[in-house]
Image (cartoon, rainbow, N blue to C red):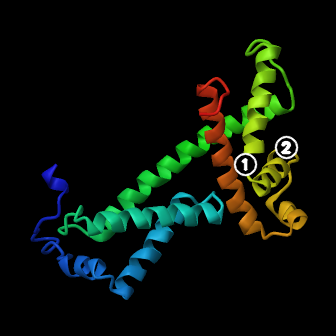
Amino acid sequence: MEDNLPQDDPQRGPTPDYSARWERLVNGERETVDALYREGYLFVRNILKNEPLQTVEDVHHDVFILFYNKLLAGAFDPKYAPEAFFKGIAKNKCFEYRKKRSKLFKFLSMLKQIWEQHYDPEELSVVEQMEEIELMRSCIDAAQLGCQQVFKLKYFENKSDTEIAEILGLTPQYVSLKRHRCLGYIAKCYEKKSKNGGKNT
């Protein structure tokens, strides 16, 4: 609606002119870019306040890269503040992350149940569930050794990131990053093989 668009208002004063700020961003003026980066990070962190710091940093990085690609492509209307577009992108990315996380958690729950061989005859036959076990193991085996170690320690032995870090001689921050990447890889592998009857493509 037009009422939602910036416009001159005798009570609010004239609409701010953001053209100079947009120009500084396009030219990569460090102070302006850094200010937007910091404000954007706080915005993403507030939305994902219950998520690990590494997740917040990863999502914020993706938002910033997407914002700048769109900026250089001339996709934004300079009548509006850069923060408005940045926050719009951030909200969408945070929503995508939560949707993906929900899907991965459901996958993980199912995966662990199969791994521990808690058969549910109402869902799958024993033979079908054994096939699921082999499919899951093939995906874990296809991952890099470091990924296999982190994945099994975290999800099948219920170790914390700190405990895994001590066992493998890594930092907890690196374990957290590795864990997210491993889970994503194994989930994609499992989904792909499931669609192809357990066969590699």
Q: Residues within 10 Å of mark 2 (few under 14, many from 20)?
A: few
Q: Is residue 86 above or below residue 152?
A: below
Asked which secondary structure carries label 1, the reply is loop
* Residue 90 in picture, x, y percent from top left: 43, 59
* Residue 79 in picture, x, y percent from top left: 17, 68
Q: Residues within 10 Å of mark 1 (few under 14, many from 20)?
A: some
The foreground one among 143 and 175 is 143
* Residue 27 in picture, x, y percent from top left: 28, 82
Label 1 sits on what residue type?
Ala
Q: Residue at x 23, y 80 (%)?
A: 23
* Residue 115 in picture, x, y percent from top left: 83, 33
Q: Is residue 147 left or right of residue 85?
A: right
Q: Residue at x 55, y 47 (%)?
A: 98
Q: Residue at x 66, y 61 (%)?
A: 52
Q: Is residue 4 left or right of residue 88?
A: left
Q: Is residue 3 left or right of residue 194?
A: left
Label 2 sits on what residue type?
Phe
Q: Residue at x 46, y 54 (%)?
A: 93
Give the Cα distance between marks 1 and 2: 16 Å
Q: Is residue 71 above or below residue 134?
A: below
- Numbered badge on residue 143: 1
The answer to which quarter of the image holds residue 12 is bottom left
Depth-wise, is mark 1 or mark 2 nearer the camera? Answer: 1
- Numbered badge on residue 87: none
The answer to which quarter of the image holds residue 6 is bottom left
Q: Is residue 181 left or right of residue 59?
A: right
* Sequence-first tag of 1 and 2: 1
The answer to which quarter of the image holds residue 137 is top right
Q: Which residue is mark 2?
A: 156
The foreground one among 184 and 4 is 184
